[in-house]
Image (cartoon, coloured by chain):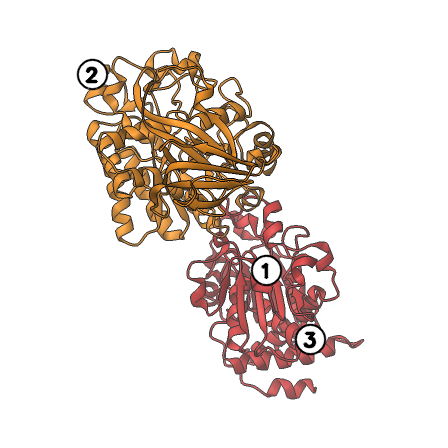
Chain colours: A red, B orange
Amino acid sequence: MNVALASQKFYFPHKHLLGIKGLSPAEIIGLLDLADADADYNRRVTAKRDILRGRTQINLFFESSTRTQSSFELAGKRLGADVMNMAIKSSSIEKGETLLDTAVTLNAMRPDILIVRHHAAGAVELLAKKVDCAVVNAGDGEHEHPTQALLDALTIRRRKGRIDGLIVAICGDILHSRVARSNILLLNALGANVRVAAPSTLLPPATERMGVEVYTKLDDAIAGADIIMMLRLQRERMTTSLVPSTREYFHFFGLDNEKLKKAKPDALVMHPGPINRGIEISSAVADHPRSVIREQVEMGVAVRMAVLQVLARHLRG
Amino acid sequence: MNAPEKMPPSSGRTILTNARLLCPMSGRDERGGLLIEGRAIADIGPHLTGSDEPDTQLIDCEGHLLIPGLIDMQVSTGEPGEEHRETLATASRAAAAGGVTTIICMPDTKPAIDDVSLVDFIERRARDTAIVNVHPMAAMTKGLAGKEMTEIGLLRQAGALAFTDAKRSVANAQVMRNILSYGKDFNALIVHFIEDPHLADVGVMNEGEVSSGLGLPGIPAEAETIMLERDLRLAALTGGRYHAAGISCAASLEVIREARKGGLKVTCGVSINHLTLNENDIGSYRTYLKIKPPLRPESDRRAMVDGVHRGDIDVIVSAHDPQDADMKRRPFAEAADGALGLETLLPAALQLYHNGATALQPLLAAMTIRPAQLLGLPGGRLAIGAPADLCLVDLEMPWRVDAQTLASKSKNSPFDEMVLQGRALKTFVAGRCVYSYADLPLRV
């Protein structure tokens, strides 16, 4: 597909990308189409373009990240932007500066695009109100992680040819997962049948009202599923004991070959990473031919390029 | 673990004839016989009057009461760790002598039963040494410390029938919420001892006129009721399966009744001590009556009996808690909590029937079919196909309790020297007779 044409096809009215919430199905599909083309483009020998030449992109990560930060960095560089990484360790945050003071300071440097990850839900939106540039949410607390949901959708669509009507089981630590929230919103918007599975202690209250089928047994949730999305057990976010042990968690909620048999024969296994082998997923399944975990990483770069491209349309001058 | 699996199955068929058959599940109360084949009840009814077949053993019940064997869901032993107090073997002999065919043992041993390997240990030891059915309850928090929940799923699969911290309450409401919520996924019954540890503090008996007179620190009934109210709200919030282990006062019963009116499915138990004794029985510092929860005033005891009679209290437990003499021969405040109960559970309960306080059916239901249903056990009923766990009861026989002749290793019976009316004559577990009163020296 012609990249220039694809980017013209749809209208993206938003200045920022703060979440999947607020995006129309047409906007999501437009982003996926564009990212689809970018993914093909990235496989060429000369992947670099100059769409963002002269633009400054700051990756502002208040929470440590390897894959998301490098994915955004690569996406910006492939489009020709000047990319700067700001990690918490070397920032003013440790010296006591508030989030908004940081925002005002950075804004004075006149960046074009800010990529922000923060440990508090709503922090990215708060920051977006105080700066003049475009802001992309790279994960805010337990709220949203929109580019992860987009890259998951792109991975599914390229493998299955559609999202509509697929049975997608999102399994594991739903309570602490921004990935789950963004995916539920996106997959529902595109017509998938979404199931979630977790121990009751790892389900957010009123999960059933998010438009999903709720399961407390992994086997039931993945029976007949087209897609199994495993989530990482985020023990660092737990203040009390929500599961008794990793041994018990793996026994009941870890995806192994035996449990995988319950899914459709051509089901795909996904994981946003980083994976904990032997806790939520067995090594055999993580490295299984049906596992598309590495493909998700590749699609991540393409999706982030697409997001940068559509936000660049609204940039000044 | 069904103990008698190790023993050879009883040789074929036994018919118990001329019995008063009483089954609290079906409501059956009639003259008749019962046929045991192998380990199970094969037939039952008035038509079983005898047999001409040569290998059929006949036992004439002489009109005595034949009931399902009792299921006691609160038994402490000292195994593992304090075998000098009680072992699974001695507890099972005390049970058999009291007509109890299934005991659920508490996890407050040393170490606490909070790991799959320990559940397995109890099951193997019971299989090898016990003469009645023994099932473990597992701890609901690691080390009974009230902080981190145990591996409820794996423990359940290993055979833990329910989860409890025995005589300890989980003070942290968040921990309790997580246990109820997580346990629900495994249909795990959470059995909670209800006593606010801060309100109970150093108290050693019921707070009131009697404690003031004795100069002993008291435990207000509110320590129990406040914890119960908290728990019921958490049960409603989580949808978890909740059982209040042993209530002791009228206010708690009222709280349970109100919650049920609101549609909450919760259950509760009471110990035989709180049905038959009150705080005045402590007299001049009788440490054998020092128990948890503490004995309450007579008005509370009456309320408990009424609760059993109306079926509002689901189960009666022995709260069997053997303590050696050294732990009891101390100043009241320093003595250990706990009282023997297995062997006297049925005879003591029958006093409530003899004095007209409750009918026989609801009284026996609370020790047979209702704990069976709560714990998912196949016994507790006289039905074809059910395990032949039975108790033949002489309702009328008067006898004097002599702690020294009780089968338990410890002798701390609060009923010592009391004259009771009615007792178990024979006890059958899985079709085998494991206790026969006539085998004992006569001691009326």
Dot 1: chain letter: A
Identify the residue position indicated by label 3 in the image: A159
Which quadrant of the rendered structure holds the C terminus of chain B?
top left
Mark 2 lies on a secondary structure that is helix
Q: Is residue A52 visible?
A: yes
Identify the residue position indicated by label 1 in the image: A219
Q: Reading the chain from its start, which is encountered first: label 3 or label 1?
A: 3
Horizontal and vertical percent position of residue B37: 54, 42
Dot 2: chain letter: B
User: Spatial distance from mark 3 to mark 2, Cα to Cα?
Assistant: 81 Å
User: Spatial distance from mark 3 to mark 1, Cα to Cα?
Assistant: 24 Å
- Look at discs 3 and 2 and give the one toward the viewer: 2
Q: Residues within 10 Å of mark 2 (few under 14, many from 20)?
A: few
Residues B199 and A118: in front is: B199
- Vertical position of residue A110 compared to residue B72: above or below: below
Inspect the image, locate mark 1, and give the three-letter code of the amino acid beneath it. Asp
Which quadrant of the rendered structure holds the N terminus of chain B?
top right
Horizontal and vertical percent position of residue B133: 51, 35
User: Which circle marks residue B213 in the picture?
Assistant: 2
Image quarter of residue B253:
top left
Q: Residues within 10 Å of mark 1 (few under 14, many from 20)?
A: some
The residue at the point 61 percent across, 29 percent down is B128
Residues B379 and B340: in front is: B379
Horizontal and vertical percent position of residue B78: 51, 23
